[in-house]
Amino acid sequence: MSDLDMMSVAERDALPFGVVGFEADTIVQSYNATEAQMSGLDPATVIGVPFFDAVAQCMNNFMVAQRFEDEPEIDDIIPYVLTLRMRPTKVRLRLLAAADTPRRYILIQR
């Protein structure tokens, strides 16, 4: 996780998978270019917005959002189907959280 925190915006944008970074309040702090291209959402409209309430309501459930509330340490990959604003799309999500780091991440591989 510290690798993601240390990366510049350009380095995160160059990654071949989506990166969404947010803090405990779920306000999006980081939204890379790959995720913007795949989702069709402009980072300017996503940064500063509550992720699970306004951006990815399809992840606001026990499988994703609740885990960030319940588990201070997460490094898990789960199969998932994105459904909001698109036809159902199978993805793999990597959920990352560490008790000693305020930022949490969801990595999205399509």
Image (spheres, rainbow, N blue to C red):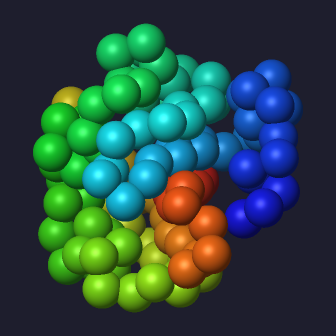
Image-quadrant location for residue 45: top left
Return the residue nearer the eye: 87 or 53: 53
Q: Residue at x 27, y 67 (%)?
A: 65
Q: In the rendered image of this protein, does residue 12 appear above or below residue 36?
A: below
Visible residue check, residue 92? no
Residue 12 point in image, percent of width and height: 75, 36
Return the residue nearer the eye: 61 or 71: 71
Residue 73 point in image, percent of width and height: 53, 85
Return the residue nearer the eye: 60 or 9: 9
Q: Residue at x 29, y 76 (%)?
A: 69
Return the residue nearer the eye: 107 or 99: 99
Query: In the picture, which quadrant includes the N terminus?
Result: bottom right
Visible residue check, residue 7? yes
| Residue 90 relative to residue 11: left or right | left
| Residue 17 relative to residue 92: left or right | right
Q: Residue at x 82, y 41 (%)?
A: 7
Q: In the rendered image of this protein, does residue 19 appear above or below residue 101?
A: above
Residue 66 point in image, percent of width and height: 24, 75
Q: Residue at x 59, y 42 (%)?
A: 18
| Residue 104 relative to residue 8: left or right | left
Q: In the rendered image of this protein, does residue 29 appear above or below residue 56?
A: above
Residue 94 point in image, percent of width and height: 56, 68
Total marks drawn? 0
Image-quadrant location for residue 71: bottom left
